[in-house]
């Protein structure tokens, strides 16, 4: 057992209760298991990074990892 740091960007930090939270994980934990998402937001509409590298919601995480989650940014 150990902890993963989860960083939330944009409006997600308001829902999660902070910009950075620590989550206790065991073996086999996935990205989607450690993030808090609003019920009306699909993981497909977000960007996930693990230790600064692109990740999928189904990718596994281990103690010491840093997971970042952010909404897609659009503009134009």
Image: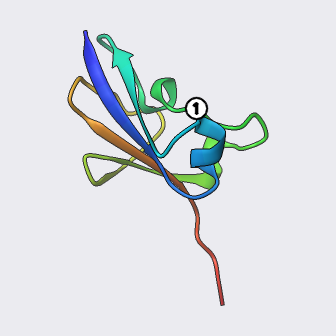
Hey, which residue is sitting farthest bottom in the picture? 76
Quadrant of the snapshot with the C terminus: bottom right
Residue 29 vs residue 3, the one in the foreground: 3
Which residue is painted at 43% across and 32% down in the image? 31
Residue 54 vs residue 35, the one in the foreground: 35
Q: Is residue 37 left or right of residue 29?
A: right
Image height of 24 relative to 8, above or below: above
Image height of 36 relative to 11, above or below: above
Quadrant of the snapshot with the N terminus: top left
Which residue is painted at 48% across and 37% down in the image? 57
Hey, which residue is sitting farthest left in the picture? 64
x and y, in percent, of residue 15 in the image: 66, 40
x and y, in percent, of residue 67 in the image: 36, 41
Q: Quadrant of residue 72?
A: bottom right
Image height of 30 relative to 57, above or below: above
Callout 1 crowding tier (Cα within 10 Å): few <14, some 14–19, many ≥20: some
Hey, which residue is sitting farthest right in the picture? 40
Q: Quadrant of residue 4?
A: top left
Image height of 23 relative to 31, above or below: above
Disc 1: which residue? 36
Which residue is painted at 58% across and 36% down in the image? 17
Tell me the SS state at disc 1: loop
Which residue is painted at 29% across and 11% down in the image? 27
Q: Is the image coloured rainbow, by chain, by secondary structure, or in one colour? A: rainbow
**Number of marks in the image?**
1
x and y, in percent, of residue 44 in the image: 62, 48
Q: Is residue 71 left or right of residue 68?
A: right
């Amino acid at each position: 057992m150990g902890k993963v740091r989860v960083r939330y960007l944009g409006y997600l930090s308001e829902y999660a209760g902070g910009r950075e939270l620590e989550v206790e994980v065991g073996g086999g934990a996935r990205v989607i298991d450690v993030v808090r998402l609003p019920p009306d937001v699909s993981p497909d509409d977000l960007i996930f990074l693990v230790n600064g590298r692109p990740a999928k919601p189904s990718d596994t995480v281990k103690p010491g990892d840093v997971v970042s989650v952010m909404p897609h940014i659009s503009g134009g």
